[in-house]
Amino acid sequence: MPGDPIERLSALFERFPGIGPRQAQRFVQFLLRSSLATRRELIDSVQELSKSVHQCVSCMRYSTGAKGECSMCVSTDRENSLLAVVASDADIAALERSGTFKGKYFVMGTTISLASEKKNGLRERELLSSLSKRARLGLQELILAFPANPEGDFTALHLRDSLRSYAKEHGFKITTLGRGLSTGSELEYADPDTIKNALESRK
Amino acid sequence: MPGDPIERLSALFERFPGIGPRQAQRFVQFLLRSSLATRRELIDSVQELSKSVHQCVSCMRYSTGAKGECSMCVSTDRENSLLAVVASDADIAALERSGTFKGKYFVMGTTISLASEKKNGLRERELLSSLSKRARLGLQELILAFPANPEGDFTALHLRDSLRSYAKEHGFKITTLGRGLSTGSELEYADPDTIKNALESRK
Amino acid sequence: MPGDPIERLSALFERFPGIGPRQAQRFVQFLLRSSLATRRELIDSVQELSKSVHQCVSCMRYSTGAKGECSMCVSTDRENSLLAVVASDADIAALERSGTFKGKYFVMGTTISLASEKKNGLRERELLSSLSKRARLGLQELILAFPANPEGDFTALHLRDSLRSYAKEHGFKITTLGRGLSTGSELEYADPDTIKNALESRK
Amino acid sequence: MPGDPIERLSALFERFPGIGPRQAQRFVQFLLRSSLATRRELIDSVQELSKSVHQCVSCMRYSTGAKGECSMCVSTDRENSLLAVVASDADIAALERSGTFKGKYFVMGTTISLASEKKNGLRERELLSSLSKRARLGLQELILAFPANPEGDFTALHLRDSLRSYAKEHGFKITTLGRGLSTGSELEYADPDTIKNALESRK
């Protein structure tokens, strides 16, 4: 039944991250049981999202507010000397929770898929354009803050390579997040690669 | 930020069953990254849901189709002698998957909360109205098909009590789903109550 | 190192139920760090086990006490009219926890493997010998209390077949544990087979 | 039944790391069903353990072989300039699996309990005695390789303090394992403390 709105909505929820057929159906059941006002609110919120959310022209993250640059990018409380390059908007939230990073961000949008080596969606051109501005504003260090998995490593390696001469020319260095034992982990259960990193980054 | 559509939508997704703040935010991020067409599709599907989905006047389940009685209730392939009374629409899907039940359904909407003993949303009046019709159509057995938990047991007990004289008068019996070992379970790990039921319902 | 006692003991612990190489090594480390007295106690307990534990000649379960019949088999508090036939000693403990069964037991030792259809270790001869005595003592019902999985079902089917004429001749019936919703389970997440059983055993 | 060998053995297995009452009973059942030869082998292996395993006088780890110093401590393939101080024998296995550490070890036996601040079992005296020898053999770096949890951190802090002047006098430095993202972890799910460490140890 392609025209059945229950089936259509269920199929749409299945495309949401982490949602399988069973939970997608529960979402639809939830909306069926909800009041008309709740469904109206969902419709309104999604419409609002399309209307008032903009992608920052500088860091590429999504936020509400004025068009152009986002509040983080124009903030004078954040240092222009540091730029954290992350894979997704959610990673910005993670770095903010740590409470220690006070620089600016750039969102690459994705990491390079190892299966296909495809860079679809990787915002390399936008990064270069953002860097030309960041360099003028006194960038001293670009931190590649990617997930500690093969895709993240490969993307970091690729960007290090492609940005090397640009970084040298404009006087900023490129770093990556430190590897080692994560808080709470015991040696006995740590994987060999993590212990290797923890030994290499001992201090 | 009450007016922020990202916050508003995230708060709304948190009301979805099984969704916490973190996943609600991921849903919003997913929609932000989605195309305008995808968001448009979500809006349309929810609007369709409000428009074309009706609650069956007989069994109270939600489905698409003509107003009035749903396709299951009018089907002549399903026996009028059996009526399964379930807590939610999702339980109908569960009984259908078993492939053995060929009777009709009635959806109570909820079970009685043990904490409050509140029966908000329990469709007792609607059940009686439906039964008056079912009785005329030859109802012989009403199966209380509630979850095997304290709320389900309490609701079944309550309905058995309140329907006893009505059932006697109209010549149908009231049964409940059998308890015992569920498929795949081992005695060693079964809870004492389940083993007690399995012993009592041995045959 | 076949002669290395650390390796030998670790390999032996790996044969314990549910223990992998990592935990087997932790057990050895635990014993290494333990006092000599603890290791001595382990040795003594295992020696005692070999010495004082007997297999009951009637129900085949292992217990301490006098040779011959175990305390459960000679108990006059337990009914001779009921006999629960289980796969393993651990299943006796499970039935006892339910607090409702007051009959006698027989331990088959295993279930039939579906892969090989081998009946190695299935105590059929011993069951017949035990039944000849149980029949004289007034057995009225033999309950096949096997796990609710294909092996348990196949073993129950096999015993029902092979004992049919014997049961008829000696005037006892053969039953199996009831199937249905186990305590705490919700219809929505129950497997189709369990719902089928719950519908069939409704009452 | 204190004298019951089944109970005694079960109670003993409950003292094994990670073993609860249920699994302890399954171990006993396993031994009951095992052949006499298997039980004999367990007894022999534990006896062997007591006989042939020695604690190395230098690193305090348990191993088989000659009395006195263990094979790792006397090995000329391992560097005398590096010493990893670990909490338990199992941590040595973890560091060995990483394949990068080629120095010597010392096993502290435990970490300091934060609840009691008790240092029972912490081999401080033995460490000093070992260090006096290690210093003569050219020790240049002592690596505190404790788990990344509060107990491990507190123990490392305590040893750093108490060894500071000794290390200065004998010309070796004290380091700790690096902290940061463990292999495979994503920023989105990393705890704030780990991200803080990953930012601080970026390179």
Image (spheres, coloured by chain):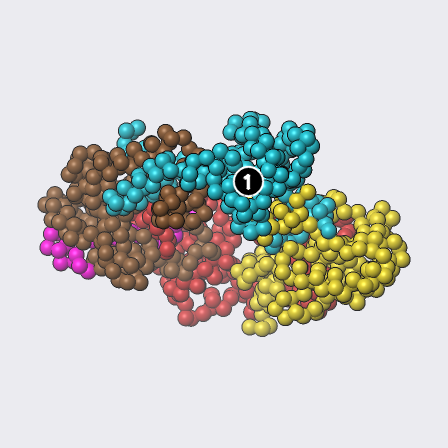
Chain colours: A cyan, B brown, C red, D yellow
Q: Where is residue B152 in the image (x, y as percent from the top left)?
A: 29, 55
Is B171 covered by the magenta stretch?
yes
What residue sits right under mark 1 in the picture?
A105
Q: Is residue C138 visible?
A: no
**Residue C196 placement, left or right of B25:** left
Helix, strand or loop status at disc 1: strand
Q: What residue is shown at x 78% (from left), y 63% (from top)? A: D163
Q: Nearer the viewer, residue B186 or B58?
A: B58
Label total for image = 1
Q: Where is residue D159 in the image (x, y as percent from the top left)?
A: 74, 63
Q: Nearer the viewer, residue A191 or B92?
A: A191
> The numbered mark 1 sits on a residue in which chain?
A
Q: What residue is shown at x 58% (from left), y 56% (from top)? A: D30
Residue span colored magenta: B161-184
Q: Is residue C145 visible?
A: yes
**Residue B145 placement, left or right of D13:** left
Q: Nearer the viewer, residue A88 or C164?
A: A88
Question: Which picture quadrant has residue D121?
Answer: bottom right
List the single residue furthest toward the bottom: D2
Compared to D151, does A44 lie above or below?
A: above
Is D166 covered by the magenta stretch?
no
Q: Where is residue D160 in the image (x, y as percent from the top left)?
A: 74, 61
**Three-letter code for the amino acid on which mark 1 is drawn:** Tyr
Compared to B40, does B83 lie above or below?
A: below
**Residue A78 placement, left or right of B100:** right
Q: Which of D5 and D136 is in front in this view?
A: D136
Q: What residue is shown at x 56% (from left), y 29% (from top)? A: A129
Compared to B118, does C114 lie above or below?
A: above
